[in-house]
Amino acid sequence: MTLLSILLATLLGGVLSVLAAAALSFSVLSRWAPRLVSYAVGVLLGAAFLDLLPEAVNALGPEDVLATCLAGILAFFVLEKLALWRHAHAEAPDTDPREAAHRAHAHHRIQPAGPMIVIGDALHNFVDGVLIAAAFLSDPAIGWAVAIGVVAHEIPQEVGDFMVLLGAGYTRRRALLLNALSGAAAVLGGVIGYFSLAHAEQAVPYALAFSAASFIYIAVADLIPELHRRWDLKDAAMQVVLIGAGVATLEAVHGFAH
């Protein structure tokens, strides 16, 4: 019964939050999707600095967490470079690779953010699954409370993920599929946590730090440069407001969940 409860709770936390975020992103928020890239920046930075990194530091200590985060940022830089190189060669095989890559990045500035956001979110969801399993092994009532907190915490972040994927050129169907797959990582985390909680818990701080690295890199290296393409005062003011709204949303949900 405990394992069945963990499976149901991780499905609730990982997949239901994706479906709820999709309903918001594809209906109420769809007309503002291009502008909500700014909101996604705030959500990603808020999740990284207000949630993931503090939790990892509490479990592991600042030096190891910061080293892991730095390694993650460098790893995502290499991943994006490889994605741009592959795209440039696929689009313009007969031209100079550097020029082709430059053109590819100019026309698809946030495209590589797609797979990176999925990887980072999958790691985060895996950690949520481990935490849900740990709570259920302690007390089923605590387990369900943690699962509800995960749903409340994940919905605004998943909305931010959808904004990134839609802004990167993904169709609604593909964005939903990728986010659902990353959400299913919570189930994997729950199962692994149930059968080998001690080993899974040891990996949690590193996964949190690596997930934070992906969010920071995507926000700073891919999304913010895209925002700078709109430089008039009205657009700049709206961007600042939406970034602040994204951070405030994560802060409010984080306080409610805890």
Image (cartoon, helix red, strand yellow):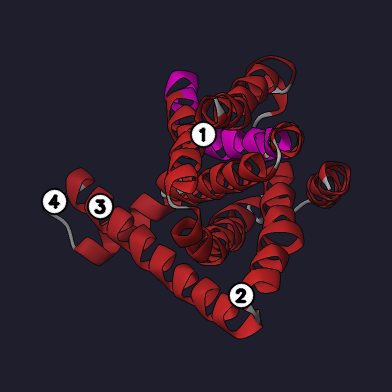
Q: Which residue is mark 2?
A: 60
Q: Secondary structure at mark 1?
A: helix
Dominant secondary-structure state across the stretch colored magenta: helix
Please indicate whether residue 227 sits to the left or right of residue 166 in the image.
right
Let me know if residue 224 is in the magenta part.
no
Q: Position of residue 217 (x, y in %)?
A: 54, 62
Q: Which residue is mark 1?
A: 183
Q: Secondary structure at mark 3?
A: helix
Amino acid type for the residue under numbered disc 2: Leu
| Identity of the residue drawn at 45% across and 75% down | 71
Which one is closest to the eye, mark 2 or mark 3?
Answer: 2
Q: Which residue is mark 3?
A: 88
- Badge 3 density bin: few <14, some 14–19, many ≥20, Cα 10 Å: many
Amino acid type for the residue under numbered disc 4: Pro
Q: How far separated are the C-alphas under marks 2 and 3?
A: 40 Å
Amino acid type for the residue under numbered disc 3: Ala
Counting residues from the start of the chain, the first of labels 1 and 4 encountered is: 4
Counting residues from the start of the chain, the first of labels 2 and 4 encountered is: 2
Let me know if residue 162 is in the magenta part.
yes
Residues 177 and 59: in front is 59
| Range shown magenta | 151-176
Counting residues from the start of the chain, the first of labels 3 and 1 encountered is: 3
Q: Position of residue 211 (x, y in %)?
A: 54, 57
Q: Secondary structure at mark 2?
A: helix
Q: Secondary structure at mark 4?
A: loop
- Residue furthest to the bottom in view is 63
Please indicate whether residue 247 sits to the left or right of residue 185 in the image.
right
Q: Which residue is mark 4?
A: 93
